[in-house]
Amino acid sequence: MENESPSAALAPAASPTPQLTALRGARTAPELTPAERQALRAELEQVLKRCPWFTIGVMAPSAGEALETLRRCERAFGWSALAAADPGADRIEGGVFLKGNQQTGSYRIRQEQGLGVGVLISGQNAEQPDLAETWGPLPLDLL
């Protein structure tokens, strides 16, 4: 896959979630065409239905961009807005990792250098743990 374009990595496969599965292990989210974005969003919406709650990780070049991405995801999926566990963390400069958890109702932001860029969403299902999975990295502006 090393010589493939990001689009080629998202080519349909025999798995139930071929595009989402193709993103596993990537360091950063791929550039996508409009058609790929639409297909990936539709696929993500389907797998999210399997899980009652989620955690989200956002790797971003700034705290503001990470928080903006979190808020877009909350609106897009109808999630309750998470509160900052560390007030003032949104002023961290440079690359960050935001970790949000619906069970706790909060998010934390920490400074991180050298990360890729993208969104990781982990579906949680205590009653059916085999349905729990992590999807991404997804583009920050997918939603």
Image (cartoon, helix red, strand yellow):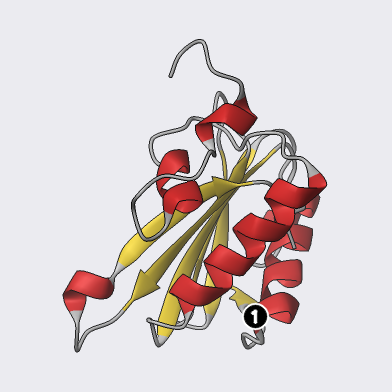
* Residue 123 percent location from the top left of the image: 39, 71
Which corner quadrant holds the C terminus? bottom right
Compared across the picture, whether 109 is left or right of 13 comes to right
Compared across the picture, whether 27 is left or right of 129 comes to right
Front one among 75 and 80: 75
Front one among 111 and 117: 117
Is 18 above or below relative to 68?
Answer: above
Is 72 above or below relative to 98?
Answer: below
The residue at which mark 1 appears reads as: 77
* Residue 139 percent location from the top left of the image: 67, 46
Residue occupying image coordinates x 79% and y 61%:
68
* Residue 7 percent location from the top left of the image: 63, 32
Q: Secondary structure at mark 1?
A: helix
Can I make out residue 61 in this image?
yes
Residue occupying image coordinates x 68% and y 70%:
73
Is 60 above or below relative to 53?
Answer: above
Local packing at callout 1 (Cα closer than 10 Å; few below 14, some 14-19, many 20+) is few
